[in-house]
Image (cartoon, rainbow, N blue to C red):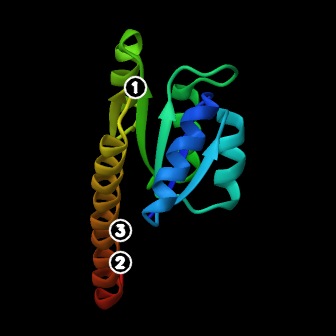
Amino acid sequence: MRIMIVDDEERLLYTTKKLFSKIGIDVLTASSGEEALRLLESETVHVVFLDIKMPGMGGLKVLTEIKKIDPMIEVIMLTGHAALESAVEGIQLGAADYLIKPVSMKSLLSKSEEAFERRKKLEEKIHLARSRNVVRGD
């Protein structure tokens, strides 16, 4: 599983990357939406934690662009209490879930594992459907 965390809070990026790395999870970080999108053009990522409120390109716009790059990426929105409506909008745009900040490492870990499992199951279904089409000659 490879995770990306997109947030303008450098401390959150540093701490989370360090903690995930200690347990063997590969983490990329981006401090802006633009940086995240550049990274996603060349890096494989399975789960993205995406802050809604960032300077420059906001999280909802970044979410839309992520889904254009790779619709299989599981995106989990990070939001403060005041932006809860935006998190719901994110779900409507294709986010898998949301977490309210401040967020614990335990919550990040469990949400990332759930999202990665969802992605693996979807990939298996796609592979199985393709295999069936090949057998039938479709």
Q: Amino acid at mark 2?
A: Arg
Q: Badge 3: how crowded within 10 Å, few (<14), some, or many (20+)?
A: few
Of 32 and 92, nearer the camera is: 32
Is the C-beta separation of discs 3 and 1 under 8 Å?
A: no
Q: Tell me what residue is drawn at x 29 percent, y 61 percent.
A: 117
Q: Tell me what residue is drawn at x 62 percent, y 46 percent.
A: 29
Vertically, is 32 above or below 80?
Answer: below
- Give the residue at mark 1: 102
Q: Badge 2: how crowded within 10 Å, few (<14), some, or many (20+)?
A: few
Q: Tell me what residue is drawn at x 72 percent, y 47 percent.
A: 38
**Disc count in the image?**
3
| 130 lies left or right of 58 | left
Q: CA distance from mark 2 to mark 3?
A: 11 Å
Task: State the quadrant of the C terminus.
Answer: bottom left
Of badges 3 and 1, the one in the foreground is: 1
Of 105 and 32, nearer the camera is: 105
Q: Tell me what residue is drawn at x 61 percent, y 22 percent.
A: 54
Q: CA distance from mark 2 to mark 1?
A: 42 Å
- Give the residue at mark 3: 123
The percent position of residue 33, horizontal first and vertical second, equals 65, 34
First of labels 2, 3 by sequence position: 3
Residue 130 circle label: 2
Q: Secondary structure at mark 1?
A: loop
Of 41 and 131, nearer the camera is: 41
Vertically, is 46 above or below 76?
Answer: below
Of badges 2 and 1, the one in the foreground is: 1
Q: CA distance from mark 3 to mark 1?
A: 32 Å
Q: Amino acid at mark 3?
A: Glu
